[in-house]
Image (tube, grey):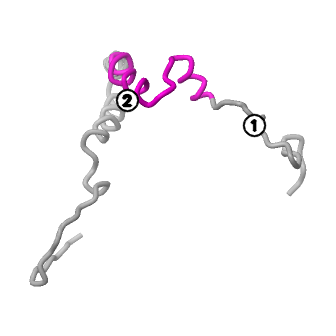
Amino acid sequence: MAVTSTSFKKGAPGKPKGAKHPQTLLKEKLGLTTWETMGEWLLNEGLDRYKLEMEKLKGKDFIFAHNTLVEYFKPKLNRTTHEGTISTNTHITVEL
C-alpha cells in the first residue's frame, strides 16, 4: 500500500487518546450520562420532539420513518425467535 499524507503513522492512531465520540459529547451536553436519564429524556422531551418532526414529514419520508419506529414495538416476524416443543408425530410442511 502506498503511503499518503493521510496514512496513519506507527504508534499514532487517528483518534487522540481521551477524545470523546461526538454522540458522547451530545449526551453529556443534554445531561444524559446514565441509561436512566437517557430513557427518561427519550420518553419525555425526545418523544415530544419526535412527534413534531413526524408531523412535518410527507409521503415516502413519513412512511419510512413510521415503519422504522413501528419495528421497535412490533418487530417483523422473521426477526423474532420462536421457541416451543413439538411432539414426535408432528409433520410440518413449509412452502416458499
* Residue neighbourhood size for the residue with mark 2, other residues' Cα within 10 Å, grouped as few (<14), some (14–19), many (≥20): few
Look at 51% across and 17% down and name the residue there: 30
Q: Is residue 9 left or right of residue 52?
A: right
- Span colored in magenta: 22-48
Look at 24% across and 69% down and name the residue there: 96
Q: Which quarter shows the N terminus?
A: bottom right
The quadrant where residue 19 appears: top right
- Any magenta on residue 27? yes
The quadrant where residue 20 appears: top right
Look at 49% across and 23% down and name the residue there: 32
Residue 16's x, y, as percent? 78, 34
N-term-proximal mark, 1 vs 2: 1
16 vs 50: above or below? below
Secondary element at image label 1: loop
Secondary element at image label 2: helix
The residue where tag 1 is placed is 15
Q: Is residue 21 left or right of residue 73?
A: right
- Any magenta on residue 64? no
Overall secondary structure of the magenta stretch?
A: helix
In terms of depth relative to the viewer, which is nearer, 64 or 79? Answer: 79
3 vs 27: above or below? below
Residue 43's x, y, as percent? 33, 23
The residue where tag 2 is placed is 61
